[in-house]
Amino acid sequence: QAKSCGRNESRFFSSEMNQLAQERLRLENALREALQDNQLHLHYQPQIDLASGRLYGVEALARWTHPEFGVIPPVRFIPLAEECGLIGDLGRWVLREACRQLAAWRAAGLSVPAVSVNLSPTSFHNLDLPGMISDTLARNALDSADLTVELTESVLLDTHPSTMKTLTEVHARGVRLSMDDFGTGYSSLSYLRRLPVSELKLDRSFVADLEHDEAARALSGAILGIGKSLHLTVVAEGVETPTQNEMLREQGYPVAQGYLFSQPLPPDEFARWLGTAVEDGAPG
Ligand code: C2E
Ligand code: MG
Ligand code: MG
Ligand code: MG
């Protein structure tokens, strides 16, 4: 086994490793334990339909609080999971947990239209992914339209032969694919012709600069134009201020997500947020 994730490898190499590498191995082992011991959680961030002010969907975001190391952010543990071969397990867990939660909210009478989950490029290597998704939806009595799968442009740098087949099959089953962090990747726009995506997420770096940078404004408008002409939903990410929200609304953005509406929340807090938002008339 080439990849080191187990305790034996850690013991074997420790004499020659510097402290940083040892710490990393401890974290790898901790992540494996976390997946087994339910130390991972999902937080949910609302996505708002700007025309109606209603909830469009929620994005599930993974959270890890280690009993000793404390909160470890996804930008640290997701790459770690990829490198030590745990990303498949993590992706499956996220899918199951997000679907279970959506079904639970609905059973409790909350109206949550859909859930989005993030999957890493490696997850699309697995030809079993479409079947796994269908099984998970069925087990929770959900429809394929209840789920969106977010992928990043790095999926396209990845030349694994199964990726396109898996994406096509997931789409064929009626699950929406969403291109995350759109506009920041390295790929050319031509992939939008080949990939069966239904949604683009305008990267939050554009939104952050909207108010002060004319180029960011021009690009957010242009990206909306691309999305519209390809009949894709375009979601603006990282909306933090009322001014950003107003500018996006004026440009014609259909959906927005960001701290202005809510941070990603644990399920019970999200349910409270939704209750309050609905009482107030419209979220955001
Ligand atoms: P992402 O999918 O683009 O998720 C959006 C990130 O922006 C989240 O960070 C979210 O908390 C943050 N965010 C939301 N609204 C705002 C805002 O108004 N301002 C700012 N500054 N940030 C905002 P988070 O949760 O730390 O996740 C970071 C990245 O880690 C995600 O980016 C995604 O690529 C990855 N990730 C998170 N959960 C998962 C997961 O379950 N699986 C995989 N494969 N990746 C995940
Ligand atoms: Mg995302
Ligand atoms: Mg994003
Ligand atoms: Mg991202």
Image (tube, grey):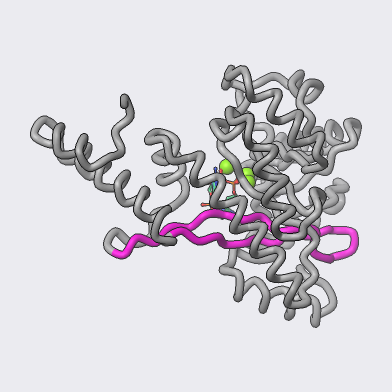
Viewer can see residue 240:
no
Q: Quadrant of residue 105?
A: bottom right
Q: Is residue 48 above or below residue 250?
A: below
Give the tally of numbered discs.
0
Residue 117 in the magenta stretch? The answer is: no
What quarter of the picture does the N terminus occupy?
top left
On the image, the x and y values in percent for residue 116 come to: 69, 51
Residue 41 in the magenta stretch? The answer is: yes
On the image, the x and y values in percent for residue 188 come to: 70, 19
Is 96 or 236 nearer to us in this picture? 96
**Residue at the image point whose x is 78% and y is 25% from the top:** 192
**Residue at the image point whose x is 46% and y is 58% from the top:** 40
Is 110 or 255 nearer to us in this picture? 110
**Residue at the image point whose x is 71% and y is 30% from the top:** 167
What quarter of the picture does the C terminus occupy?
bottom right
On the image, the x and y values in percent for residue 197 come to: 78, 34
Viewer can see residue 43:
yes
> What residue occupies the far left of the structure in this picture?
15
Q: Is residue 193 left or right of residue 94?
A: right
Is 108 or 48 nearer to us in this picture? 108
**Residue at the image point whose x is 57% and y is 52% from the top:** 94
Q: Is residue 196 above or below residue 199?
A: above
Tell me which secondary structure the magenta stretch mostly adopts: strand
The segment highlighted magenta reads: 40-67
On the image, the x and y values in percent for residue 194 come to: 78, 21
Q: Is residue 274 above or below residue 173?
A: below
